[in-house]
Amino acid sequence: MSDIYLQTDQDLPAIESLMAEAFGPQRHGRSVWALRPGPPVTSLCLVIREGATTIGSLRFWEVMLGSQIILLLGPLAVRPELRGRGVGRALISEALDRATGGDWPLVLVSGEVDYYPRFGFVPAAPYGLDWPGFIEPERLQFFELQEGALAALPAGPLAVRPLPG
Ligand SMILES: CC(C)(COP(=O)(O)OP(=O)(O)OC[C@H]1O[C@@H](n2cnc3c(N)ncnc32)[C@H](O)[C@@H]1OP(=O)(O)O)[C@@H](O)C(=O)NCCC(=O)NCCS
């Protein structure tokens, strides 16, 4: 059975190859990648390994929604030949558990419309999110880490979180 770990530097080559397989060479040109110029949230960078092989990766970045810092989920990718075995589900469930109780009120994802609702994500479209750049609005989905966060959604656009200092 495979196990979940915090990502280490040794996972980085495998993660790059997972990203290339899943999202292709044009991935860095997509608007979601522009929201992640800095480092990810290390406490939420998870991998699943089978033996010494990294077979799945999930990372999060902090982004600004108006004046509030929220989490942007992704990228998430699983080795193509190992999809459909619960690897993605295990990574997301573990990460949402770890993120709950922190300072973040919300998680936002730009992802598969049929995949994220099973974890409790809801469409972001009704909230009129101001996303920077091109996006298919139906892919945007929110998950509440703090009850009532969506009802108190701050005004303002989604933007890169400036690096501290
Ligand atoms: C999307 C992805 C991460 C799913 O990982 P996975 O390990 O295959 O998913 P799981 O096995 O945990 O699937 C859990 C459930 O979701 C379903 N599911 C899997 N991929 C799905 C998709 N793209 N759309 C809708 N449902 C999906 C599975 O059938 C399973 O359903 P079940 O619980 O009823 O059996 C994987 O297919 C992948 O790496 N895709 C390419 C990259 C990508 O699209 N990433 C997500 C965008 S951010």
Image (cartoon, rainbow, N blue to C red):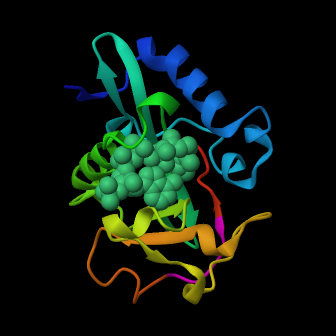
Q: Is residue 6 above or below residue 101?
A: above
Q: How many marks?
A: 0
Q: The C terminus is located in which quarter?
A: top right
The answer to whether residue 72 is visible is no
At x 43%, y 33%, the residue is 57
Q: Is residue 87 above or below residue 160?
A: above
At x 59%, y 82%, the residue is 125
Q: Which residue is at the front of the view, 39 or 53?
A: 53
Kindly report the secondary structure that dominates the magenta region of the rendered protein.
Answer: loop
- Within the magenta stretch, is there residue 40? no
Q: The N terminus is located in which quarter?
A: top left
The answer to whether residue 95 is visible is yes
In screen coordinates, is 29 left or right of 81?
right
At x 61%, y 37%, the residue is 22
The span picked out in magenta is 154-158
At x 45%, y 40%, the residue is 59
